[in-house]
Amino acid sequence: MENIFAYSFVLKSIAGALFASITAGIIGTYIVSRRLVFLSGGITHASFGGIGLGYYLGINPVAGAALFGLTSAVGIEYLSAKGKMREDSAIGILWAFGMAVGIIFIYMTPGYAPNLMSYLFGSILTVTWGDLIALGIMSAVLIIYTALFYRTILYISFDENYARTFTRHVDLFKYVSVGLTGLAIVLNIRMAGVILIISLLTIPANIILLFTRRYLQIVIWSFAVSFIGISTGFAMSWVTSLPTGPAIVFVLVLFWMIARGVRWLKVKRKVIT
Amino acid sequence: MSALFKIESLNAGYENRIVLRDVNMTVMNDDFIGIIGPNGGGKTTLLKVILGLLRPFSGRIDFTPGDLKMSQIGYLPQVAQGDTLFPVTVEDVVLSGLMLNKGAAGRMSRDDRKRAASVMDELGLRPLARQALNELSGGQLQRVYLARAVTGSPRLLLLDEPATFVDSTFEADFYEKLRLLNSRMAIMMVSHDVGTISTWVKSFACINGGLNYHPHSKITQEDLKMYGCPIQLVTHGDVPHVVLHKH
């Protein structure tokens, strides 16, 4: 009996790590390149309000989070595109509001009090097979979307004004990209939590950016780095029985510091020779 | 020499503000026109209307005389728009000029890469093909954007203040490249620097609300004053000009 439980746990962990890494590769590269890290932080925390709402209404918290995540992602893109508001201020307000609403709803929900910590760093134990299937479909959508429209996504992100001269769908692509970003973040929340998601989206892409400026390479290698980082974090927490989420963040930051060191040595050697 | 496109009684602007009034002009397929005029006079607005980025209030751009297509217009926007820290190589940027002839799901073929390579050769960018944009000088960066604008073999090239960030040593070189390109495409170039570009362009259009066309590359301070183009000019000359439309 214990074996079956362990087997399912390992399988879930591998699938979860794989899907989270696909998100890190594709969405991470997109938001780091377009400098949308703060935006994704905002979306992530706004989603927390949806989680609270889900508990309060007794529906799946991920559905509530998806509603909040998608609305806030598209809403911020709209407000800043129309020049109606400073983008960073809009994000800051949404960030605080999402967290506050989430905690208020959870407080008002009678009886059951979910473990808040598990929504900060995630918990593979609470992940259901349903969550993983949703993540799997999301990963497939991300891969197909990126593969099909690679050049258009790349050039709109790089120089939107020029892109308008060759496609009439610049705004559509921006909304779809940012909407997918919101959804991907939300689907990862149960497993990775609010903090771990931000680190998965930011750190691997930044590590690879130290070594290449080729967009596709960054997507592929960020995926690899985040899979290795998650696996190492899992192993570390298994051995030391430290909490998994923080262990993964710690490992990723360690990788990043090592990469900076390697990069520094490379530049130095180039100067000497 | 034949007509490429026509601008017909064009009125354009933004929200409640009209910037261009009753502009009429015929552009020929071998033109090299310097577009000059004060800030806010409508130079960039005119380019935007031609590119279809801004819908005019009234009037139209008639592409039928030269059977010009939207995908045959190359565009070099004012610099400092693309993020030079963005992870994209010189080759990628040059290739983006080919998106004009592709749909949103367009991919780059071997032939596309060859075409980009030959344009990079022509503009002296080939050794930089794999470089990131933040490793380039201002002049090199500007040539990259020029390469992007011409890699799709346009018949009309629109340039918006192309020399703003170019080192003066490379400026002549840049304009020389434009002169070569002019043998296969019409060029319209917005500039502040009337003195320098008069060496290179074949004619001037002065835009200050309306448009005045000077079919020569030399204009005098008096010409400019008379037609409401408050621009400092050091060149002297006694060249007649034809006014297509009054302000």
Image (tube, coloured by chain):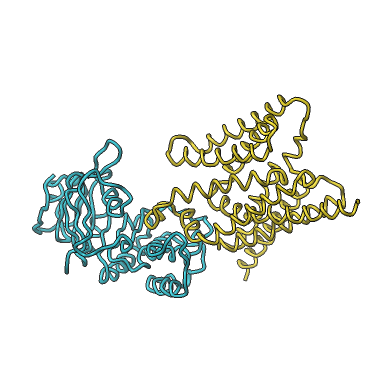
Chain colours: A yellow, B cyan
Q: Which quadrant of the view contains residue A215?
A: bottom right
Residue A223 seen: yes
Please name whichever residue, A142 or B35, is drawn nearer the observer in this view of the structure.
A142
**Residue that protrudes farthest toward the right in the picture:** A1
Please name whichever residue, A81 or B234, is drawn nearer the observer in this view of the structure.
A81
At x 84% / y 55%, what residue is drawn? A7
Say above or below: B5 vs B46: below
Rendered-image quadrant of the N terminus of chain B:
bottom left
- Exactly how many numbered labels are in the figure? 0
Rendered-image quadrant of the C terminus of chain B:
top left
- Using residue B75 as the reference point, say whether residue A105 is left or right of it: right
Say above or below: B190 vs A273: above
Q: Which quadrant of the view contains residue B153?
A: bottom left
Q: Position of residue A213 (x, y in %)?
A: 56, 61
Q: Position of residue A237 (x, y in %)?
A: 83, 50
Say above or below: B178 vs A167: below
At x 40% / y 74%, what residue is drawn? B118
At x 36% / y 63%, what residue is drawn? B149
Residue B192 seen: no
